[in-house]
Image (spheres, rainbow, N blue to C red):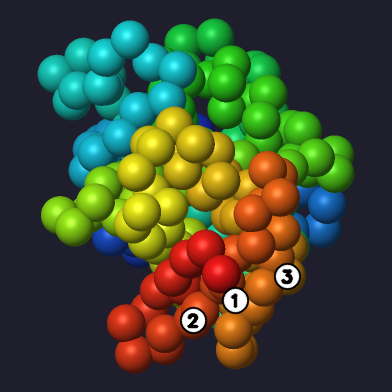
Amino acid sequence: MSHDPVPGDSPHPEALWPGQLHWIELLRDGLTFDLSGLVPGRAAPFPDLAHRFDLPAMPVSEACEAVVLRPGPHLAAGGNSQPVMRGLLAVACDLVRQFEDCIAIVWGPAGTAIGPRFFESVVSAWLDGGPFPALGLTAFVEAPDGALESIGLGFWIGQELRIEPPLSADRIAATRLGIRLVNHLVITGAPAEDDRIIAPDGTRLVLRPSRSRGVISVWRE
């Protein structure tokens, strides 16, 4: 803990975060993050959830309360930069290890609720140089036309991924491909023009960005 503006149980004279008068500042690797929704103040607003990973059921507001971890105000200009987000997720892993009562971690950009053990495992592996945790920090949904689309990748690279039919016909294989492509795109960034890669099964693929639609479409070449 690097800063508690008002020690004890007193609320802050001004709300740094709307509706949250009780918060503390946490320091990690030279970056500061604010944790709000703390007792004796009100819990943070319960998040909107659409996908779950390694959880038997979706968390509900009647059974648990939410706290929010976010970059400090001076990091706001950094937005969703990877150094800031890696620091944020590292702090989240620290909190998971320390507090056994944590039911789930929610990643807002993808609307996902993630089991604590799974979250700590995949995020720690990524922070140590492993693959990006696409299942959790992004999600996949089936589009009306049968394509497989990512949710939340746009937070990281500005565009979502769309695996086009018939490449998306085998949902399990398409999801595995999507996981690999999300990892590739988080490392390289969104392509400015058509990009060609080889899939694990040897298939040649074309990645075609469409800035007007905000998606990167994937086809067999």
Residue 164: image x %, image y %? 37, 61
The image shows residue 62, relative to residue 220, as above or below, that is: above
Instruction: Tell me if label 3 and label 1 are in contact, CB under 8 Å.
Output: no
Q: Give the amino acid type for the residue marked by disc 1 in the picture.
A: Ala
Q: Nearer the viewer, residue 13 or 151?
A: 151
Q: Quadrant of the C terminus?
A: bottom right
Label 3 crowding class (10 Å Cα cut-off): few <14, some 14-19, many 20+? few
Q: Which residue is disc 2 drawn over?
A: 209
Query: Does 141 sit left or right of 99 as displayed?
Result: left
Cα separation between marks 3 and 1: 7 Å
Residue 188, disc = 3
Q: Residue at x 46, y 11 (%)?
A: 101
Cα separation between marks 2 and 3: 14 Å
Q: Quadrant of residue 68?
A: top left
Residue 125: image x %, image y %? 77, 33
Ranked by sequence position, the earlier of labels 2 and 3 is 3
Q: Give the mark toward the camera: 1 or 2.
A: 2
The image shows residue 177, relative to residue 109, as above or below, that is: above
Instruction: Tell me if label 1 and label 2 are in contact, CB under 8 Å.
Output: yes
Ranked by sequence position, the earlier of labels 1 and 2 is 1
Q: Residue at x 19, y 23 (%)?
A: 60
Residue 190, disc = 1
Q: Is residue 36 visible?
A: no
Query: Does 20 sit left or right of 131 as displayed?
Result: left
Which secondary structure lies at badge 3? helix
